[in-house]
Amino acid sequence: MSAVARLTVRLVVVALAVSFASFSLLSAAPGDPAAAKAGFSATPERVAEIRSELGLDDPFLVRYGDWLAGVVQGNFGTSVLNQQPASKLIGDAMPHTVELMILAQIIALGVAIPAGVYSAQRPNGWFDRLAGAVSFGMLATPPFVLGIYLAFVFAVRLDWLPAVATDLPGLLEDPVENLRQMILPALTLASGMVAIYVRLLRTDLIETLQQDFVLMAQSRGYSRRRVLWRHAFRPSAFSLLTATGLTTAGLLGGALIAETLFAVPGVGRLAVTAIFTEDYDVVMGVVLLLSVAFVVTNFVVDALYTVLDPRVRHGSR
Amino acid sequence: MAVVDAPTSRTGDRAPGFGRPSMGFIFWLSVTWILLVVLAAALADVVPLRDPDALGVRTGEIERFETPGKNAWFGGDGQGRDLFAQVIHGARPAMVLSAAVTSIGGSLGVLVGVVAGYFRGRTDSVIMGVAEIMFAFPAIILLFAVSAIWGMTMAILIPAMAILAVPGYARIVRGVTIALAERDFVDAARAMGASRSRVVIKELLPLVALPAIAFGFLGFGLVIATEGALAFLGLGLEQRTWGSLIAGGQGLIREAPHLALIPATAMFLTIMAFNYVGDGIRELIDPRPIVVGRKRKADGHDPAISAASEALLSIRNLTTSFPTAGGTVTAVDGVSLDVRTGRSVGIVGESGSGKTMLLRSITGAFPVLGVQRTGRVVVDGTDLLTASPAQRSTMLGTEIGIVSQNPLTALNPVRTVGSQLIEVMRVHREISKAAARARAIESLAQVGIPQPDQRVDMYPHQLSGGMRQRVTIALALANEPRLLLADEPTTALDVTIQDQILRLLSALCEQRDMALVLVTHDLQVVRGWTDDVAVMYGGQIVEAGPTAAVFDDPQHQYTQALLASTPRLDLRPHSRLASIEGQPPSLVAPPPGCRFAARCTIADDRCRAEDPMPVQIRDREFRCWYPGTGKAT
C-alpha cells in the first residue's frame, strides 16, 4: 500500500470512529438545539417546526448519515447561534489556533534543543541538574495554573503584555501587536512540551554520545561542537520528532485552556462556547478537525523520519 | 606529572538520573506534603476552621477581598469568605477523585496492558488500536457530554475519567510485560504446566505492579490537574474544588490576585509532590546504570619533552583509570611502549587486559565519564596529554588515523560515506568541497572499493561489513597520518574478508611508511602481520619484543600459556585464544606481586608477594621472576 493510501485509510477510520462517538454522545445529551435556536419566547409549535426542519426527529443513524453526507459535500451545518455556516466560524478561528500551536512548538523546540544538548554533554553537571529540576517543575504545572502565574507576573505586575487577546489583529496586518498578545498563550502551551522534549533529547543524546561513531569522530580531532551537532544530534532526534507529533494532539486540548484563559478567538474557545450554547454542528466540526489534524500530524512526522533517517528511507532499519 | 581528565570529585558511583530525585530530602518533603493534604481532606470538618461558606460581609470577621494576613491566612474572597477554609475543604474532592480514578483506571489499565503484552498477536493489535483512537479522541468532549447527560457529580466523573486513564496505564504495562514475557521464568512456569491465565496472574501481575504504582502517582497528579482544567472551563464538579476556586479567582487577577494564586499554588505543590514520589519509586525499581558521558580536558604545563626519541609514538608510564560502581578501575597501569615509523606493533591479550583502553588512551576518546590519564603519550614530539585543545585536535586529525573494531557502528548512520570523508578533510586542511569530493572518491578506490563514484553517495547501511571497514580505513587515511591505530579491525568480519582487510592495512602502511598499532586477541594476526608484539595482562605489558622472537621463545609464563593454549605447529588459521584456567585479576584492587600468579602453574610465594621488575635484554622485555623455562634468574 502506498503511503498516501495508508494515510487515507487511517484518516477515514479515525475520523469515522471519533465523529460517530462524538455524535452519539452529543445526541444523547439532554439539551434541545431546536429550543436553543428558536429562542426563549418561541411557542412549542415553533420549536417543533424547527426540530423537524433540522431533522432532529429522525432516527439517530439517519441523522448521523445526513451529517456525514453534508460533510462529504463540504457542508458542516449551521451554527444555531448566529446562522453562520459552521465551516466559516471554524475557518475564521483556525488561523489563530494554528499560529498559537506553531508558536508554542517553536518556543518549545527553541528552548528544549539547546537545553537538552547542553544537559547531555555533562550529565549531572550543574546545568543538567538545573534543567532537570526546572523541567520537572514544568511537567507538574497544569497549563491553566502556569497561565495564571504568567498573566499575574507579565500582565498585572510588570504590565508588559496584555492579559487578554480580545482585539487580536491578524499576524500579517500587525505582527508586533499580534505577537504581543499571543506570546503568553504560546508560552502557556509550550511549557509542558519543553519538559518532555528536554528529557527525551537528553536521554537519546547521552546514548548516542557513547556510540562508536561518535568516539571515532572525536578521535579524528573534531571540535566538541562539531561532534555534537554534526554527528550526534541528528541520530538522537528521532524520539524528539515522535514526541512533536504526539504532543500536537495534546496541544489541541491545551489550546482549549490557553485560548479560554487569554480570550484568544481560536478554535478551542469556539468549541468551548459551542458546547455551552449547545451549538452541536460547530462542536462536531471542531471534533472532526481535531481528529484529522491528529492523524495528519503523525503522518507528517512519519514522513519526516525518512528525511532524517536514511535507514528508514531504504527500508533496512 | 599528572594530567587530570576530570575533576577527581566525580566519583561516578550510581549518580542519579536527570530530573530523577534520589530518595532524599525532597522525596520525604513531598511525602509529608501529600500526608498533609490527605489529612486536610480527611479532617476538614473536624479541625477548628471558619465555615468556608460563612459570608464575611455579614459576620464582619473578614472584609471583601481581604488580603492574606493574620486575620485570614489566605485572605478573603468577594463576599468575605475565608479562603484558607475553602482551600482546606477543596482538598477533599481532589483526593477522593484522584484516588478513585487512579485505583479503578489503574487496575483496569494494568489488566488490559498485561493481556495485550502477554497474548500479543490479534488481542494486542485490537487493544492498542482502540487505545490509539482513544488518544485521538478529545477527552474534553467525552467529559462534557457525560456531564451534560448525567450532571457532573463524583459518581459520573470517576468512571468517565477512569476509562480515559486506561490506555495510558495499558501502554506502560504492555511494554513491561513484553519485556518480562520473554524471560526464562515465564517460559519455565508455562513449561511446568501453568495455564496461560495463571501465568498472567501469578507470575506477571506482581512484577508489573510496581511500575504501575509509580505511574499511578504521576497519574494521581494528572487527575488533579484535569479536574482543575474542567472546573476552569466551567465543567467541574458541583463541590468546591481547587479548580473551581482558581476558576472563580481568575477573572479577578488584577483586583485580588491571591484568590487565584493561592489555590493554584496548592494544586501545583500537590501535583509536584505526587510526581516526585512517583519518580522516586520508579528510581527504586529501575535503578539507572552509571551515568556516563564524556569530559576530557588536558591541562597542565608543557613538560619540556625530553630529547626527541626516534620513535614516532612514545608512551611512557601511562596509567588510565576511571571510576565505576565497584571502585576505581585502573585499566592501563604504567605502560611504556615505543613505535617507530614504518613498524607495526601488535598488542595482544585476553578481553579485559586493557589493550583497547591503551589504544583509547592515545586518542583520549572514552565511552565513560571521568577518565584520568597520567604519564606521557608523545606523538611526533607532542605530548597529547598536555597539548592545547587546538594542538591535540590537529594531531588527532592529521597525524593519527583510527580504525575501529566494529565497522557496523563506526560510521555515522545518517550521513553519506562521502560527506563523512569530505568532512574529515575540510576540518583539518584548506581544501575546496569539489576537490575534497574528488579526493574522497580517489581514496575509496585506494582502499579497494569498486565503483567509488557511486558508493561515495551511499549511506553506511547500504554497504557490506567489509566495505564499511574499508570506508573507515579510508576515513583514517584521509589526511595521510603517520600513525595508524587499529582496534581489532577484523573481529566483526567474516574470515575471508579478515584477510583482505589485513592485507590492505599492511600494504598501505608499507606504501606510506606509516606506523601501525594493531590491537587484537588473535595470535595468528599478530604472527602474520606485525613486526613487534606487546602482550598485555591485567593492564600491564608483561612481555614485549620482536614478534618472531617472542613467538619462538616466549619468556613470560603468561605468554607461554597463551601460545600453548593453541597448538604450536599445526595452528589453524585465525584460531582464537583458548582460555587459560582461572580469571584475569581485578583491575579495581589488583593482587600484590605478579598479576598472573594466581593462574600461573609455577608461581611461588615470591611471585605472589613481589611485583616482578621489568627485565630488558636487548630488544626484548618482560616482567617475570621465572622467565623462559622457569629457572630462577
Image (cartoon, helix red, strand yellow):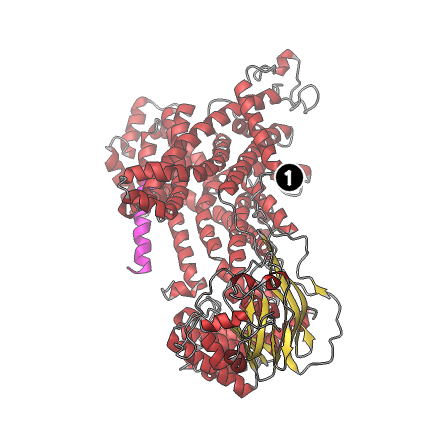
Q: Above or below — where is B512 with respect to A144?
A: below
Seen at 37% across and 37% down, the residue is B205
**Mark 1 lies on residue:** A155
- The spot of residue B524 in percent (x, y) is 45, 77
View extreme (front): residue: B631
- The spot of residue B386 in percent (x, y) is 70, 69
Query: Which range of residues does the magenta coloring cover?
Result: A1-19
Tell me, yes or no, whether the highlighted magenta stretch contains residue A149. no
For disc 1, the chain is A
Residue A254 is at least partly visible in this image:
yes
- Horizontal side of A194 relative to B199 (left or right) equals right
Residue type for callout 1:
Ala
Looking at the picture, tell me which residue is in the foreground, B170 or B253: B170
- Looking at the rendered structure, the secondary structure element under dot 1 is helix
Looking at the picture, tell me which residue is in the foreground, B294 or B551: B551
Quadrant of the image containing the C terminus of chain A: bottom left
Seen at 47% across and 45% down, the residue is A251
Q: Look at the magenta stretch and give its main secondary structure.
A: helix
Looking at the picture, tell me which residue is in the foreground, B393 or B558: B558
View extreme (top): residue: B59
Q: Above or below — where is B468 with respect to A6?
A: below
The image quadrant that residue B591 belongs to is bottom right
Q: Above or below — where is B411 with respect to A32?
A: below
Looking at the picture, tell me which residue is in the foreground, B347 or A180: B347
- The spot of residue A185 in percent (x, y) is 55, 43
Residue A70 is at least partly visible in this image:
no
- Horizontal side of B80 relative to B241 (left or right) equals right
Tell me, yes or no, whether the highlighted magenta stretch contains residue A11. yes
Quadrant of the image containing the N terminus of chain A: bottom left
